[in-house]
């Protein structure tokens, strides 16, 4: 199969595995040239979207994802925490906004949200939105109604990753199926939210698994608007703690091919930046990555210092992508007070109904 000489003009949803493998196997310079050409057709090449993560519920997760420090099945020394108070989440979001983040992504170590959690997470969405930030959540599996409720609350993005290829998936997770993940993604899409979906590389998978993950993402009826490509963060105590390092060029290739297959999506250079040098990150931007997680922590592990990221942006002539703020500060304060009152009422009602 002849790998593409010219990148496609149309957005395709019918990629074959062998075509993707051929792209991943191109000479590095040819691949990066194609990816950068596609990138420039759809995006300003010198703008990168910045999102900050916040762990709203940490640790003690019942799932067995082999990469995850938050699974209760592995002794990673992580202290479990209760669901964060809404006030604390708003405080964190304000701090993230003050350092330049435009999207606030709230993650919970859950298999899926319980009914009692929903009023709280809904209030978090409304509170963060009222700060004039984009909102994203990752709470595990969602049923149709939960997706609709989050969409009605104004949640902009839902993150739910496929993580790897369908063939390799069983080596990494046994407590939920690939189809479960696709079902949640369909519920999110049908509820009208934007989809954030990607995966992890460096988990001992083969090149064909990276192709398989990209194929699944690129052949969705609508491409995820946001595609996080995570480099495995090897955490002591997890089954993947001693996994061999992936060649950084293979990481860059994965980003470049994601860019070519999903030309209009934001591709995020996600977990793993703490261990990457500036040159690798610069190559990732050249390959078409145009989003990062920004802030000194991911969910539970370290991320580069914000000042270091800003220095890197400056050295590369990169600007953070803007996001419009709509409300005045007084309007924001009023909305937050209203949200807090609502959630207090909801929890009173929930406790009374128990
Ligand atoms: N519990 C929810 C779930 O799994 O759907 C949401 C939080 S979970 C931590 C979100 C994503 O973080 C996972 O799907 C995985 O892709 C990524 N992730 C978790 N641990 C990681 C690690 N050690 N290295 C890289 N990515 C990781
Ligand atoms: C995603 O794809 N990566 C983020 C976010 N979505 C939720 C999470 C990375 C977690 C890395 C390990 C940790 O810090 O716990
Ligand atoms: Fe739980 Fe999510 Fe970690 Fe899997 S990735 S163990 S579902 S927190």
Image (cartoon, grey):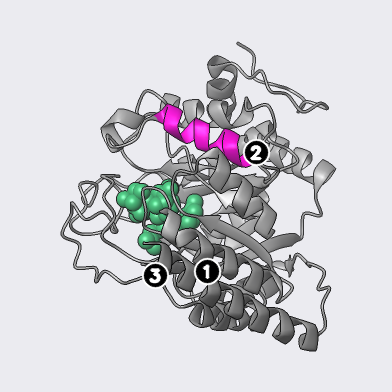
Identify the magenta region.
178-189
Q: Position of residue 347 (x, y in %)?
A: 47, 70
Q: Quadrant of the N terminus?
A: top right
Disc 1: residue Cβ within 8 A of ligand 1's nearest atom: no
Structural distance between the alpha carbons of marks 3 and 2: 26 Å
First along the sequence among labels 3 and 2? 3
Q: Quadrant of the C terminus?
A: bottom left
- Looking at this view, name the residue that lies furthest to the top: 1
**Is 289 within the magenta?**
no
Left or right, 86 with reference to 153: left
Name the residue located 65 percent from the left edge and 38 percent from the top edge: 189
**Is residue 271 at all visible to an observer of this figure?**
no
Q: Position of residue 328 (x, y in %)?
A: 82, 83
Report the front residue among 260 and 104: 104
For residue 189, the mark is 2
Disc 2: residue Cβ within 8 A of ligand 1's nearest atom: no
For residue 83, the mark is 3
For residue 31, the mark is none
Q: Is residue 218 above or below residue 247?
A: above
Name the residue located 42 percent from the left edge and 62 percent from the top edge: 353
- Looking at this view, name the residue that lies furthest to the bottom: 330
Characterize the local packing of mark 1: few (<14), some (14-19) or many (20 or more) Cα atoms within 10 angstroms. some
For residue 346, the mark is 1
Query: What's the magenta bit mostly, secondary-structure-wise?
Result: helix
Report the front residue among 149 and 175: 149
Q: Position of residue 136 (x, y in %)?
A: 60, 58
Structural distance between the alpha carbons of marks 2 and 1: 27 Å
**Is residue 302 at all visible to an observer of this figure?**
yes
First along the sequence among labels 2 and 1? 2
Q: Position of residue 292 (x, y in %)?
A: 59, 61
First along the sequence among labels 3 and 1? 3
Structural distance between the alpha carbons of marks 3 and 1: 16 Å
């Amino acid at each position: 199969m002849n790998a593409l000489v010219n990148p496609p003009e149309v957005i395709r949803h019918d990629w074959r595995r062998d075509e993707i493998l051929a792209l991943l196997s191109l000479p590095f310079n040819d691949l990066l040239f194609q990816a950068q050409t596609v990138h420039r057709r759809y995006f300003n090449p010198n703008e990168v979207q910045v999102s900050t993560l916040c762990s709203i519920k940490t640790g003690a997760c019942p799932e067995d994802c082999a990469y995850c420090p938050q699974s209760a099945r592995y002794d990673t020394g992580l202290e479990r925490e209760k669901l964060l108070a809404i006030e604390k989440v708003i405080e964190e979001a304000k701090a993230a906004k003050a350092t330049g983040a435009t999207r606030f992504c709230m993650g919970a170590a859950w298999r899926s949200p319980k009914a009692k959690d929903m009023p709280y997470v809904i209030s978090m969405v409304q509170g963060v939105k009222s700060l004039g930030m984009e909102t994203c959540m990752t709470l595990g599996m969602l049923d149709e109604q939960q997706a609709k409720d989050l969409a009605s609350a104004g949640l902009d993005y839902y993150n739910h990753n496929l993580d790897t290829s369908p063939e390799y998936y069983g080596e990494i997770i046994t407590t939920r199926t690939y189809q479960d993940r696709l079902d949640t993604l369909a519920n999110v899409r049908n509820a009208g939210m934007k989809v954030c979906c990607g995966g992890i590389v460096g988990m001992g998978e083969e090149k064909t698994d990276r192709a398989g993950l990209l194929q699944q993402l690129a052949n969705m009826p609508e491409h995820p608007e946001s595609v996080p490509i995570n480099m495995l963060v090897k955490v002591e105590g997890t089954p993947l703690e001693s996994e061999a390092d992936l060649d950084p060029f293979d990481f860059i290739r994965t980003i470049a091919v994601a860019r070519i297959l999903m030309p209009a999506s934001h591709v995020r250079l996600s977990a793993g930046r703490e261990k990457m040098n500036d040159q690798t990150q610069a190559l990732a931007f050249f390959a078409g990555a145009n989003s990062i997680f920004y802030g000194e922590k991911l969910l539970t592990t370290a991320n580069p210092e914000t000042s270091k990221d800003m220095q890197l942006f400056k050295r590369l002539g990169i600007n953070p992508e803007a996001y419009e703020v709509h409300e005045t500060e007084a309007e924001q304060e009023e909305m937050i007070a209203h949200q807090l009152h609502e959630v207090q009422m909801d929890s009173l009602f929930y406790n009374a109904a128990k």
